[in-house]
Amino acid sequence: MSDRLTAGVVGGSGFTGGELLRLLDGHPNFDVEQATSRSYERKTVGHVHPNLRHLDLRFTSPEDLESVDVLFTATPHGVSMEHIDAFQDAADTVVDLSADFRLSEAAQYDEWYDGHVCPEYLEQSEYALPELNRENLPGADLIAAGGCNATATILGLKPLFDAGILSGDEQVVVDVKVGSSEGGAGASKASSHAERSGIVRPYAPTGHRHEAEIEEYLGLSVSFTVHAVDMVRGAAATCHVFPDGPVSKGDMWKAFRGSYGDEPFMRTVAGGGGVYRYPEPKSVAGTNFGEVGFEIDPGNRRLVVFSAIDNMMKGSAGQAVHAANIALGLEETAGLDFTGFHPIGSP
C-alpha cells in the first residue's frame, strides 16, 4: 500500500467533522481531498473551524463526492444508512461516525432507534474500538465508530470481563457525565450558554441508546444514566459493580494490566498520589488516550470503576482514525501520538 492515501470527510462542518479534519491534516499518511457541508458549501474550512484557517480547502456539496481511499462520514443518525451505496462507490474504506452501523441486527434498531433501511450492511460492518475489536479491523471496508458514552463504559468494564470478575449476570449501575460538544454544533435552547453554564443535568436518566452497544459488545445489561455537565469536551463514566464474590485490589490491578498493559492509548489511574488520583476528562482533553481506574468498597461488596475520555477524540474522531490506521495497515498510532495540555481550563 502507498504511504500516501487520500481522504474525504462528509459532514465536515460539525464538531466531529472538524476534529477529523484536524487529525487528518496532521496525519503522516493522509491527504485530505474533500470536506462536505450543505450549510457551508463553498466556504473555507477555516470559516467554520478557526483552528484550521491554514487549510486551503473549501466545503463542497455532499452530492458531489470525489473518489478517495477512505471516506469518514460524520453525519447525523439516519443519513449514512440512506447514502451508504454512494459512500462505498466513492471510497474503498468507509468509516462512519454515526450510530447507523454500530449494532449487528435490524431488530436492535427497531428497539433503540427508528428502524434501519439497509440492514444487509450491518453484518459486514466492524465496530471501530480497537481495544475491543482490533483483530477484526484489518482489511475492513465498513467501520462504525462507537458512541462516546458506550466507549467510556465499555473501556472501564472490559477488564472485569477479560479477567472473569464479571460474567454478565451481575448488577451494574453506570453514571456518565458528558460535555456540551456531545450535542453537536446545532443550536438548541438547552445548549445555549445561559442554560448550559453551571449545570449537572440528568438528560437521559433511563433508556439511553448507547445501552444497546454496551449490551451487545459486553453481553451486559446495565442501569445507565447520563448527566450533562459544565464542560465542553469529555465523558466520564462511574460504574458501580456488585460481583458475586470477593475481589481484591490485586485482582483488579491484574485485570486492568492484563487488558491494557500493551495498549498504546490506555492508562490505568487508580488512587495514586497527587491531585489527579482517578481518571477525569481534563487529563485526556484533546488526545486519543483513555484513562481507567477503580476503587474497592468491601463493606458494600462493591467495585467502583472509573473511566474518562475526550468524547471528540477517543469517543469519536480519534477512535475512527485509530481504527482506519489498523484497517489500512498503517502504524496504528499514526497521527494520534500526541499528549494533551496541563494545566488547562474547561476541556
Image (cartoon, rainbow, N blue to C red):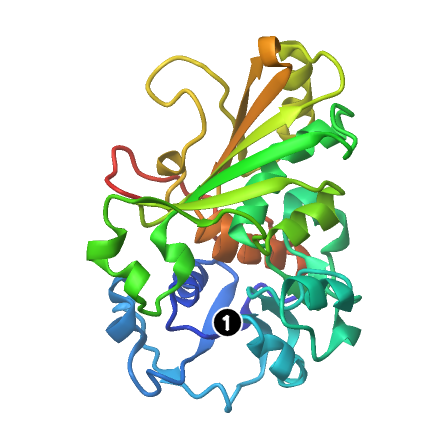
Q: Is residue 104 above or below residue 239?
A: below
Image spot of residue 118 (x, y percent) = 73, 78
Image spot of residue 204 (x, y percent) = 49, 51
Instruction: Indicate the quadrant where residue 194 lies.
Output: bottom left
Q: Is residue 322 left or right of residue 140?
A: left
Instruction: Indicate the quadrant where residue 39 lies.
Output: bottom left
Instruction: Indicate the quadrant where residue 272 lies.
Output: top left
Quick one: which residue is furthest to the bottom in this view? 64
Residue at x 57% of width, y 14% of height: 296
Image spot of residue 43 (x, y percent) = 29, 83
> The residue under label 1 is which amino acid type?
Pro
Residue at x 53% of width, y 86% of height: 65
Image spot of residue 246 (x, y percent) = 72, 11
> 260 or 210, which is in the foreground?
210
Quick one: which residue is furthest to the left in this view? 194
Q: Is residue 159 above or below residue 4?
A: above
Q: Is residue 52 above or below residue 271?
A: below
Q: Residues within 10 Å of mark 1 (few under 14, many from 20)?
A: some
Which residue corresponds to mark 1? Answer: 76
Question: Could one spot residue 326 in this view of the protein?
Answer: yes
> 226 or 164, which is in the foreground?
226
Query: Could you tell me which secondary element the residue under label 1 belongs to?
Result: loop
The number of numbered discs placed on residues in the rendered structure image is: 1
Quadrant location of the N terminus? bottom right
Quadrant location of the C terminus? top left
Question: Could one spot residue 87 in this view of the protein?
Answer: no
Residue at x 34% of width, y 15% of height: 274
